[in-house]
Image: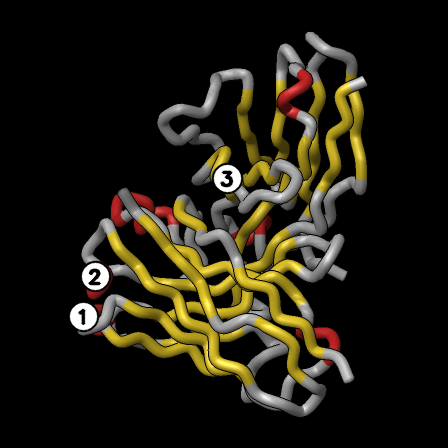
Amino acid sequence: EVQLVESGGGLVKPGGSLRLSCAASGFTFSNAWMSWVRQAPGKGLEWVGRIKSKTDGGTTDYAAPVKGRFTISRDDSKNTLYLQMNSLKTEDTAVYYCTTHSRWLRFYCSGGSCPIDYWGQGTLVTVSS
Amino acid sequence: QSVLTQPPSVSGAPGQRVTISCTGSSSNIGAGYDVHWYQQLPGTAPKLLIYGNSNRPSGVPDRFSGSKSGTSASLAITGLQAEDEADYYCQSYDSSLTEGVFGGGTKLTVL
Protein backbone atom coordinates (compact mmCIF):
# COMPACT_ATOMS: atom_id res chain seq x y z
CA GLU A 1 0.00 0.00 0.00
CA VAL A 2 1.32 3.39 -1.00
CA GLN A 3 1.86 5.71 1.95
CA LEU A 4 3.02 9.31 1.96
CA VAL A 5 3.55 10.88 5.37
CA GLU A 6 4.42 14.55 5.60
CA SER A 7 6.07 16.18 8.57
CA GLY A 8 7.78 19.43 9.48
CA GLY A 9 4.87 21.84 9.33
CA GLY A 10 4.31 24.48 11.96
CA LEU A 11 4.30 28.17 12.76
CA VAL A 12 7.03 30.36 11.31
CA LYS A 13 7.52 34.11 11.08
CA PRO A 14 7.52 35.95 7.76
CA GLY A 15 10.98 35.80 6.24
CA GLY A 16 11.74 32.55 8.02
CA SER A 17 12.50 29.09 6.72
CA LEU A 18 11.02 25.63 7.12
CA ARG A 19 11.78 22.21 5.69
CA LEU A 20 9.03 19.72 5.04
CA SER A 21 9.67 16.01 4.71
CA CYS A 22 7.62 13.29 3.11
CA ALA A 23 8.34 9.67 4.02
CA ALA A 24 7.27 7.36 1.21
CA SER A 25 6.58 3.64 1.28
CA GLY A 26 4.77 0.96 -0.67
CA PHE A 27 6.32 1.74 -4.05
CA THR A 28 9.72 2.14 -5.69
CA PHE A 29 10.47 5.68 -4.59
CA SER A 30 13.58 6.07 -6.73
CA ASN A 31 11.51 5.60 -9.91
CA ALA A 32 8.77 8.03 -8.90
CA TRP A 33 8.15 11.61 -9.91
CA MET A 34 7.10 13.46 -6.79
CA SER A 35 5.19 16.72 -6.42
CA TRP A 36 4.05 19.14 -3.75
CA VAL A 37 0.58 20.67 -3.88
CA ARG A 38 -0.69 23.19 -1.35
CA GLN A 39 -4.06 24.47 -0.24
CA ALA A 40 -4.52 27.71 1.64
CA PRO A 41 -7.23 27.64 4.33
CA GLY A 42 -10.62 27.66 2.68
CA LYS A 43 -9.06 28.00 -0.77
CA GLY A 44 -8.35 25.83 -3.78
CA LEU A 45 -5.46 23.60 -4.75
CA GLU A 46 -2.20 25.08 -5.99
CA TRP A 47 0.61 23.14 -7.67
CA VAL A 48 3.91 23.98 -5.98
CA GLY A 49 6.48 21.98 -7.88
CA ARG A 50 7.79 18.61 -9.02
CA ILE A 51 10.95 16.57 -9.08
CA LYS A 52 11.53 13.80 -11.57
CA SER A 53 13.32 10.55 -10.81
CA LYS A 54 17.08 10.57 -11.20
CA THR A 55 16.79 8.17 -14.12
CA ASP A 56 14.59 10.74 -15.82
CA GLY A 57 17.04 13.52 -15.09
CA GLY A 58 16.03 14.49 -11.56
CA THR A 59 14.90 17.88 -12.81
CA THR A 60 12.70 20.20 -10.82
CA ASP A 61 10.02 22.66 -11.85
CA TYR A 62 8.28 25.22 -9.67
CA ALA A 63 5.21 27.40 -9.71
CA ALA A 64 5.95 31.08 -10.24
CA PRO A 65 4.93 32.20 -6.71
CA VAL A 66 7.57 29.96 -5.09
CA LYS A 67 10.34 29.92 -7.69
CA GLY A 68 13.63 31.06 -6.19
CA ARG A 69 12.36 30.59 -2.64
CA PHE A 70 11.39 26.89 -2.49
CA THR A 71 13.58 23.91 -3.33
CA ILE A 72 12.40 20.35 -3.84
CA SER A 73 14.91 17.56 -3.30
CA ARG A 74 14.90 13.85 -2.71
CA ASP A 75 16.94 11.23 -0.88
CA ASP A 76 16.28 7.94 -2.61
CA SER A 77 18.31 6.06 0.01
CA LYS A 78 15.82 7.21 2.64
CA ASN A 79 12.70 7.14 0.45
CA THR A 80 12.13 10.74 1.46
CA LEU A 81 11.05 13.86 -0.39
CA TYR A 82 11.84 17.33 0.90
CA LEU A 83 10.53 20.85 0.42
CA GLN A 84 12.88 23.57 1.63
CA MET A 85 10.96 26.79 2.03
CA ASN A 86 12.87 30.05 2.47
CA SER A 87 11.83 33.70 2.65
CA LEU A 88 8.37 32.61 3.69
CA LYS A 89 5.46 34.97 3.20
CA THR A 90 2.06 35.07 4.87
CA GLU A 91 0.53 33.93 1.58
CA ASP A 92 2.49 30.68 1.86
CA THR A 93 0.21 29.64 4.72
CA ALA A 94 -1.39 26.39 3.58
CA VAL A 95 -1.68 22.68 3.99
CA TYR A 96 1.14 21.12 1.97
CA TYR A 97 0.47 17.77 0.35
CA CYS A 98 3.14 15.36 -0.83
CA THR A 99 1.90 13.59 -3.95
CA THR A 100 2.83 11.09 -6.60
CA HIS A 101 1.27 9.08 -9.38
CA SER A 102 1.23 5.48 -10.52
CA ARG A 103 3.74 4.78 -13.25
CA TRP A 104 1.01 3.87 -15.74
CA LEU A 105 -0.37 7.40 -15.43
CA ARG A 106 2.94 8.80 -16.73
CA PHE A 107 1.44 8.65 -20.24
CA TYR A 108 -0.97 11.41 -19.20
CA CYS A 109 1.69 13.77 -17.86
CA SER A 110 2.12 17.08 -19.63
CA GLY A 111 5.22 19.15 -19.03
CA GLY A 112 5.75 17.30 -15.79
CA SER A 113 2.21 17.96 -14.59
CA CYS A 114 0.69 14.57 -13.96
CA PRO A 115 -2.62 13.21 -12.72
CA ILE A 116 -2.17 12.50 -9.02
CA ASP A 117 -3.54 9.30 -7.56
CA TYR A 118 -1.60 9.31 -4.29
CA TRP A 119 -1.75 12.07 -1.71
CA GLY A 120 -0.37 12.38 1.77
CA GLN A 121 -2.51 13.60 4.63
CA GLY A 122 -0.95 17.05 4.44
CA THR A 123 0.97 19.19 6.89
CA LEU A 124 -0.05 22.70 7.87
CA VAL A 125 2.39 25.57 7.48
CA THR A 126 1.38 28.84 9.09
CA VAL A 127 3.38 31.96 8.32
CA SER A 128 2.50 34.67 10.79
CA SER A 129 4.16 37.19 13.06
CA GLN B 1 -6.93 33.96 -10.02
CA SER B 2 -6.52 30.58 -11.71
CA VAL B 3 -6.00 30.25 -15.46
CA LEU B 4 -8.62 27.49 -15.37
CA THR B 5 -12.03 28.91 -14.52
CA GLN B 6 -14.66 26.87 -12.69
CA PRO B 7 -18.03 27.98 -11.36
CA PRO B 8 -17.75 28.55 -7.60
CA SER B 9 -20.78 26.41 -6.90
CA VAL B 10 -23.33 24.10 -8.46
CA SER B 11 -26.23 22.25 -6.94
CA GLY B 12 -28.71 19.55 -7.75
CA ALA B 13 -31.30 17.30 -6.20
CA PRO B 14 -30.64 13.61 -5.54
CA GLY B 15 -30.91 11.62 -8.74
CA GLN B 16 -30.33 14.61 -10.99
CA ARG B 17 -27.45 15.29 -13.37
CA VAL B 18 -25.03 18.16 -12.87
CA THR B 19 -22.08 19.38 -14.88
CA ILE B 20 -19.05 21.35 -13.79
CA SER B 21 -17.16 23.31 -16.40
CA CYS B 22 -13.46 24.09 -16.55
CA THR B 23 -12.64 26.87 -19.00
CA GLY B 24 -9.09 27.48 -20.10
CA SER B 25 -7.30 29.00 -23.05
CA SER B 26 -5.04 28.25 -26.01
CA SER B 27 -2.04 27.79 -23.71
CA ASN B 28 -3.56 25.01 -21.64
CA ILE B 29 -6.69 23.02 -22.49
CA GLY B 30 -6.88 24.50 -25.97
CA ALA B 31 -3.29 23.46 -26.64
CA GLY B 32 -4.31 19.85 -26.23
CA TYR B 33 -3.04 19.22 -22.72
CA ASP B 34 -4.97 16.64 -20.79
CA VAL B 35 -7.46 17.58 -18.09
CA HIS B 36 -7.82 15.66 -14.83
CA TRP B 37 -10.52 15.99 -12.19
CA TYR B 38 -10.46 15.58 -8.42
CA GLN B 39 -13.05 15.24 -5.70
CA GLN B 40 -12.24 16.59 -2.25
CA LEU B 41 -14.51 15.67 0.63
CA PRO B 42 -14.40 17.97 3.66
CA GLY B 43 -11.25 17.55 5.72
CA THR B 44 -9.65 15.02 3.39
CA ALA B 45 -7.04 14.97 0.65
CA PRO B 46 -8.28 15.16 -2.94
CA LYS B 47 -9.09 11.98 -4.82
CA LEU B 48 -8.45 11.42 -8.54
CA LEU B 49 -11.80 11.14 -10.29
CA ILE B 50 -11.00 11.46 -14.00
CA TYR B 51 -7.66 11.36 -15.78
CA GLY B 52 -6.74 12.06 -19.39
CA ASN B 53 -9.97 14.02 -20.01
CA SER B 54 -12.37 11.11 -19.82
CA ASN B 55 -10.90 8.07 -18.10
CA ARG B 56 -12.02 6.80 -14.72
CA PRO B 57 -9.59 5.15 -12.29
CA SER B 58 -10.62 1.79 -10.96
CA GLY B 59 -13.24 2.17 -8.26
CA VAL B 60 -14.75 5.42 -9.47
CA PRO B 61 -18.44 4.93 -10.28
CA ASP B 62 -19.51 5.35 -13.89
CA ARG B 63 -21.86 8.10 -12.69
CA PHE B 64 -18.83 10.32 -13.12
CA SER B 65 -17.69 11.19 -16.64
CA GLY B 66 -15.38 13.73 -18.22
CA SER B 67 -15.16 15.38 -21.60
CA LYS B 68 -13.10 18.01 -23.36
CA SER B 69 -13.77 20.28 -26.31
CA GLY B 70 -11.76 23.23 -27.54
CA THR B 71 -10.58 25.31 -24.61
CA SER B 72 -12.97 23.75 -22.08
CA ALA B 73 -13.56 20.55 -20.20
CA SER B 74 -16.53 19.27 -18.24
CA LEU B 75 -17.23 16.87 -15.43
CA ALA B 76 -20.69 15.32 -15.42
CA ILE B 77 -22.25 13.56 -12.46
CA THR B 78 -25.44 11.61 -13.01
CA GLY B 79 -27.73 10.05 -10.42
CA LEU B 80 -26.60 12.58 -7.85
CA GLN B 81 -26.16 11.20 -4.34
CA ALA B 82 -25.72 12.92 -0.98
CA GLU B 83 -22.19 11.52 -0.73
CA ASP B 84 -21.22 13.45 -3.88
CA GLU B 85 -21.36 16.70 -1.93
CA ALA B 86 -17.76 17.88 -2.13
CA ASP B 87 -15.37 20.27 -3.84
CA TYR B 88 -14.28 19.42 -7.37
CA TYR B 89 -11.13 20.61 -9.11
CA CYS B 90 -9.84 20.39 -12.67
CA GLN B 91 -6.12 20.24 -13.45
CA SER B 92 -4.05 20.71 -16.58
CA TYR B 93 -0.74 22.14 -17.78
CA ASP B 94 -0.13 25.65 -19.04
CA SER B 95 2.63 26.13 -21.59
CA SER B 96 2.85 29.91 -21.07
CA LEU B 97 3.34 29.51 -17.32
CA THR B 98 5.28 26.25 -17.84
CA GLU B 99 3.65 24.78 -14.78
CA GLY B 100 0.77 22.59 -13.68
CA VAL B 101 -2.42 24.47 -12.94
CA PHE B 102 -5.62 23.77 -11.04
CA GLY B 103 -9.01 25.32 -11.45
CA GLY B 104 -10.36 27.40 -8.59
CA GLY B 105 -12.68 24.61 -7.50
CA THR B 106 -16.43 24.07 -7.51
CA LYS B 107 -18.50 23.30 -4.45
CA LEU B 108 -21.25 20.80 -5.23
CA THR B 109 -24.29 20.94 -2.98
CA VAL B 110 -26.81 18.12 -3.04
CA LEU B 111 -30.15 19.67 -2.17
Q: Is residue B94 visible?
A: no
Secondary structure state at the residue bearing disc 2: helix
Residue marked by disc 3: B47
Q: Residue at x 60, y 61 (%)?
A: A95
The disc labelled 2 sits on which kind of residue? Asn
User: Who is closer to the viewer here, A71 or A21?
Assistant: A21
Q: In the rendered structure, are the residues bearing label 2 and label 1 in contact, judged by CB atoms less than 8 Å apart?
A: yes
Check the residue under mark 1 and report the chain it is in.
A
Question: Is B65 located above or below residue A43 in the figure?
Answer: above
Picture quarter with the C terminus of chain B: top right
Residues marked 2 and 3, same chain: no
Whether residue B36 appears in this view of the structure is yes
Which mark is first along the chain, 1 or 2? 2
Residue shown at 77% from the left, 27% from the top: B109
Task: Name the colour scheme.
Answer: secondary structure
Kind of residue at badge 1? Thr
Q: Is residue B61 left or right of residue B96?
A: left
Q: Is residue B39 above or below residue A90?
A: above
| Residue A112 coordinates in the image, percent (x, y) | 40, 63
User: Within 10 angstroms of label 2, few (less than 14), some, or many (20 or more) residues?
Assistant: some
* Residue B80 found in image quarter: top right
Q: Quadrant of the N terminus of chain B?
A: bottom right
Tell me the CA gap for discs 2 and 3.
22 Å
In the picture of the structure, the residue carrying the numbered disc 1 is A55
At horizontal 54% and vertical 82% (from top left) the residue drawn is A18
Q: CA distance from mark 2 to mark 1?
A: 7 Å
Residue A31 is tagged as 2
Indicate left or right for B11 with B15 as reference.
right
**SS at mark 3?**
strand
Q: Which residue is depicted at the point 26% across and 55% down? A: A25
Identify the element where label 1 is drawn.
Answer: helix
